[in-house]
Image (cartoon, grey):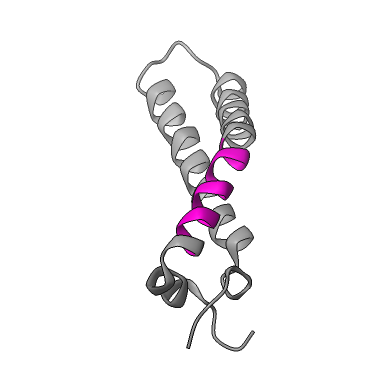
Amino acid sequence: MTTSSEDVPVGLISAVIYASIAATAAGLFLIATFSSDRYGSVERFGGAAWVFLLSMIILMPTVTPIVRRLSIRSPEVSQKLRIEGE
């Protein structure tokens, strides 16, 4: 059985990837600011939200074509990533 690019939920997979990378970047920002007592909670959480937002803006158009290209190029990856029942 062959799979096509429609079998793989590219949008869902790429959203999970870029959201987790952006959340990791925001978490690293929080860790960096909690290691110092120079920043208040507004700066810490506001900066983390800003890092998350900017990371999402940068990663959305970058990750989606990569996932799409990988799912089209490799049928075995497409088969593994396919959600059953759709």
Q: Is residue 65 left or right of residue 29?
A: right
Q: Residue at x 49, y 63 (%)?
A: 71
> 83 or 55: nearer the eye?
83
Task: Tell me where residue 30 appears, x and y as whole percent.
Answer: 46, 30
Report x, y in % for residue 29: 45, 27
Residue 22 lies, in percent from the top left, at 52, 39
Camera-side residue: 70 or 60? 70
Question: Taking 59 as reference, is 35 above or below it?
Answer: above
Locate residue 44: give its quadrant: top right
Quarter of the image where the C terminus is located: bottom right
User: Percent x, y for residue 24?
Assistant: 44, 40
Q: Is residue 62 above or below residue 76?
A: above
Q: Is residue 74 left or right of residue 6?
A: left
| Residue at x 60% of width, y 62% of height | 12
Would you place residue 84 above or below residue 40 in this image? below
The residue at 59%/61% (across/down) is 10
Q: Which residues are magenta?
A: 59-71
Residue 63 drawn in magenta: yes
